[in-house]
Amino acid sequence: MEHLVSTVLFWPILWLMAGLAILLLGGHLLVPATVSLARHLRLPPQLIALLLVAGGTSAPELLVSAEAALSGSPAIAISNVAGSNMANMLLVLGLGAVLAPIATHEAVSRRDMLVMAGFTTLVFGFFMLTGSLPAFGAGLLLVLFVLYIGWVLKSDSAIEAEPDSPLRPAQSATLLLVAVVSLIIGADLMVDGAVDLARQAGISEAVIGMSIVAIGTSLPELAAVLASLLHRQSDLALANVIGSNIFNLAGVLGIAGLLAPLPAGPELTEFGLPAVAAITLLLGGYVLTGKPIGRKSGLVFIGLYLMFLFWTYVG
């Protein structure tokens, strides 16, 4: 029996360890590749982080939510986005702020924070008023998302960036692709291992979706934020989190909502979605006032996230 238990636990633990190693590799490559590509394109690194990196690190959320919508599990699709955005704002930024203060004074950050708050309000309004995200709402989210990307490219492309870089353009783009793919693969392996362990412990699918899967799909963002702070690029850290949340709200829910109807149960309308809205307001207070997220605030963020997880498990 002991041999059987050890064999059953071996593979999940192996996936966890392998995923962590690949995740660390991706984080190590990410910031140099982002800065180098931005210089070649004569764009600010924050724009690359907001669009390419945030979009890439949101790929796990898109895959999970799309698969859940097609397989007839809309609650998982919605809870994955809600849980992932909570993990991004509280856990990712909280752990990052404990490592180093996160600057919030950039005008670009304030603009995109307002956009994120707008998408949060729109999604929250659809679910609270109708109890679901209809196809019309999903389509509207995608249209606004495309318009937002066009606006960002037009408004930020005029900002001059340093043209020099030790890497060639093709090398920079390839390195960035390898970094983002490594983050996605590493996170996927870690999620598989964690879900297997949780199922063996008898934890329900709904709780796994809101907590373990949501945290797992936020691991690329966590690696990206920690790597940015270690390279003293705190503006990239915040841009990645805000950009990822916008991708989740507009891109992920928009695509999932077009694939299948997304009705929300009471556990989401009564707790999950209001919690996301409240934390968005909290983060907005920091960004709009330009107050940096320091170590004490980071600890508060982590504490709030632990409370969120506790309520998710016992609620």
Image (cartoon, rainbow, N blue to C red):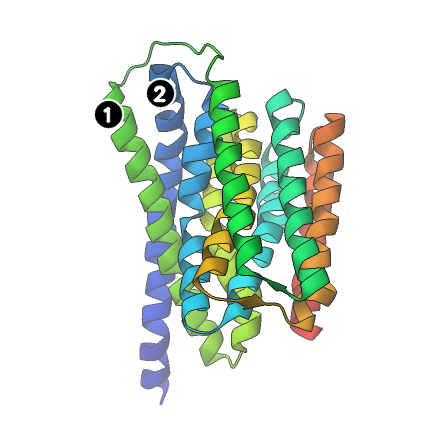
Residue 12 found in image quarter: bottom left
In-front residue for pair 34/297: 34
Q: Position of residue 102 (x, y in %)?
A: 62, 30
Q: Position of residue 181 (x, y in %)?
A: 32, 44
Q: Secondary structure at mark 1?
A: helix
Q: Is residue 112 above or below residue 307?
A: above
Residue linked to disc 2: 36
* Residue 230 seen by the camera: no
Residue linked to disc 1: 171
Mark 2 to mark 1 CA distance (whole Å): 9 Å
Q: Position of residue 150 (x, y in %)?
A: 47, 29
In-front residue for pair 6/288: 288
In-front residue for pair 243/167: 243
Amino acid type at mark 2: Ser
Amino acid type at mark 1: Gln
Q: From the image, which quarter does the C terminus lie in?
A: bottom right
Q: Residue at x 70, y 54 (%)?
A: 125
Q: Is residue 202 left or right of residue 177?
A: right
